[in-house]
Image (cartoon, rainbow, N blue to C red):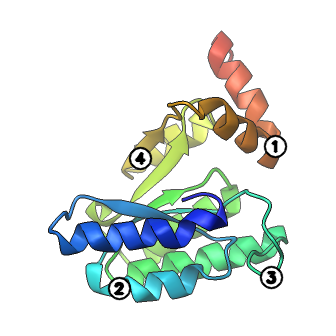
Amino acid sequence: MENSPYTTKTLNLYRELREKGFDNVGFVIQAYMRRSLDDLKELAPYKPNVRLCKGIYVEAESIAYRDKEEVRSNYKRLLEFVFENGYYPGIATHDEPLIQFAEDYIKRNQIDKSKYEFQMLLGVRENRRDELLRAGHNLRIYVPFGEDWYGYSTRRLKENPEVAGHIFKAIFGIS
């Protein structure tokens, strides 16, 4: 789903699979893409499972937000939309303001823990991950693999160099 040339193709494949009766599939929506809310609205009839992330590819400003606060604002708007419309969101972020927003929204709206999950990369912000688990939230640990695992991981490091420290500590068992 990453990288704009694949967005429409991926969403079309999702629709095709759902129309053939496959209900156990989902897709990723990136908050930095300007089109994301429209994409979610178009897919509303499916009540989809959606992994909501910020997104990191370098895209033209005409199709993507570039300012960190614009991306955060859109993430919040998208998260509210998916909750309000019965989607199952994977809240995929390590960004503390977004995690806190999600926790507050969930608590304020008394959303049952079976209706969402948090998602975090293996080895990143493990203390925060453990706090989310202790609070009773479901959490999926995301592990990159496959032929492009290195490229994917490198993009994460470029997006947030702090991730390198978390990975280093996880590799060497440092708290």
Most extreme residue toward the top is 172
Residue at the spot of label 2 = 44
Rendered residue at 71%/71% (across/down):
72
Tags 4 and 2 touching, CB below 8 Å: no
Q: Earlier in the sequence, mark 4 or mark 2?
A: 2
Would residue 94 appear left or right of 158 to someone viewing this image? left
- The image quadrant where one finds the C terminus is top right
| Number of residues whose C-alpha sits closer than 10 Å to that of mark 1, classed few (under 14), some (14–19) or many (20 or more) | few
Q: CA distance from mark 1 to mark 4?
A: 24 Å
Q: Earlier in the sequence, mark 1 or mark 2?
A: 2
The image position of residue 141, as x and y in percent, is 46, 39
Residue at the spot of label 3 = 62
Tags 2 and 3 touching, CB below 8 Å: no
Q: CA distance from mark 2 to mark 3?
A: 25 Å
Q: CA distance from mark 3 to mark 1?
A: 22 Å
21, 157: nearer the viewer: 21
Residue 111 can be seen in this image? no
Residue at the spot of label 4 = 139
